Image (cartoon, rainbow, N blue to C red):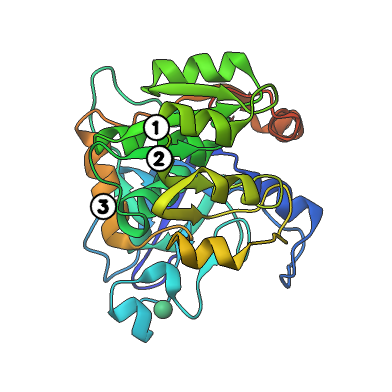
């Protein structure tokens, strides 16, 4: 497995799990080559580099952006890599990071920043997918402004937790929901201004109460079917609903009258482009957005790690040590 001219081979030290891995296990409409290697997120040491690679060199410790683009189509040339006509994700459309080695384009690695205390391999592996996804949702797509109210559903999810933290970096006021009081406590410690237990409380009513009856300017929804209608009820006039996932189901219903009358904007978002990845990595190098790791498992116990994620009890990222 030698790297191509502009590719690097990374000796993986840790791979972080995402809900995507569970979707892949469940089966996605992708032509897999078996045995398929799971894992989108990873960190490790560059072990070999193609002759045209200039960004990194062997021996560099890097984290991996799991979204691989062609870097040649019109979307890529416009800098919109997650709109690439041949966009692929490690572990989904190509062999993933739960392996000793993975080969990726040089554009897909970023040197692990030096922090005090130093980032662990697990933390570095846990950074990319959720932070990049949340960054694009909150910064680029929803354009969250300081002082705006942002509702983030299901803050136990990796993207939601990252969205809370990115929104706080921008100076927004964040309401976080979860069905777990322990996770709500964690959300508070990471900056949430208000928390709601969506199992015990009526979210739209509480959001109205918290926002002087106006509603939230932005709703971050990764759940889909279970939350969509309530999300729309939570929005302020002119509000933006941004989604990157449908963990509870893909088909939703929208009252179009409310959509036009209140002038809502519905925004889709997937992963992110290279500039967003570099900007998020820069924030990490400034000591912001340091990943929260739930548990570290050896590769031989990867199944237990996936079950931990499937059970939903985690607080932060579940990581596999390679
Ligand atoms: Zn492309």
Which numbered disc, 3 or 2, marks the residue closer to the eye? 2
Mark 3 vs 1, N-terminal side: 1
Q: Secondary structure at mark 3?
A: helix
Residue 255 versus residue 63 in the image, above or below: below
Q: Nearer the viewer, residue 4 or 112?
A: 112
Residue underneath mark 1:
211
CA–CA distance in space, label 3 to label 2: 35 Å
Residue picked out by circle 2: 214
State ligand 1's quadrant.
bottom left
Q: Quadrant of the C terminus?
A: top right
Residue on which disc 3 sits: 278
Q: Which mark is residue 294?
A: none
Give the residue drawn at x 71%, y 28%.
308
Marks 3 and 1 sit apart, C-alpha to C-alpha, by 34 Å
Identity of the residue drawn at 23% across and 30% down? 114
Give the quarter of the image for residue 60. Answer: top left
Residue in front for this viewpoint, 241 or 69: 241
């Amino acid at each position: 497995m030698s790297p191509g001219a502009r590719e690097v081979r990374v000796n993986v030290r840790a791979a972080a799990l995402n809900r995507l891995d569970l979707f892949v296990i469940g089966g996605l409409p992708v032509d897999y080559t078996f045995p398929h290697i799971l894992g989108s997120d990873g960190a490790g040491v560059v072990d070999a580099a193609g002759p045209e690679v200039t960004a990194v060199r062997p021996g560099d410790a890097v984290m991996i952006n799991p979204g691989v683009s062609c870097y040649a189509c019109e979307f890529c040339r416009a800098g919109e890599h997650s709109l690439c006509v041949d966009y692929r994700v490690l572990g989904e459309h190509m062999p993933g990071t739960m392996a000793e080695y993975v080969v990726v384009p040089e554009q897909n690695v970023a040197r692990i920043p030096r922090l005090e205390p130093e980032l662990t391999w697990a933390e570095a592996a846990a950074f990319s997918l959720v932070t990049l996804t949340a960054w694009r949702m909150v910064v680029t797509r929803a354009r969250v402004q300081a002082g705006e109210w942002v509702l983030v559903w299901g803050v136990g999810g990796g993207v939601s937790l990252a969205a809370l933290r990115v929104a706080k970096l921008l100076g927004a006021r964040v309401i976080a929901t979860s069905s777990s009081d322990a996770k709500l406590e964690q959300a508070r410690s990471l900056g949430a201004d208000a928390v709601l237990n969506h199992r015990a409380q009526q979210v739209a009513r509480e959001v109205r109460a918290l926002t002087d009856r106006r509603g939230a300017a932005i709703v971050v929804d990764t759940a889909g079917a279970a939350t969509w209608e309530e999300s729309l009820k939570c929005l302020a006039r002119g509000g933006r609903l941004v989604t990157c996932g449908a963990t509870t189901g893909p088909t939703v219903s929208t009252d179009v009258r409310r959509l036009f009358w209140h002038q809502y904007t519905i925004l889709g978002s997937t992963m992110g482009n290279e500039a967003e990845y570099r900007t998020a990595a820069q924030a990490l190098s400034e000591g912001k957005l340091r990943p929260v790791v739930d548990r570290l498992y050896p590769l031989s116990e990867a199944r237990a790690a996936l079950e931990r994620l499937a059970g939903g009890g985690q607080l932060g990222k579940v990581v596999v040590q390679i």
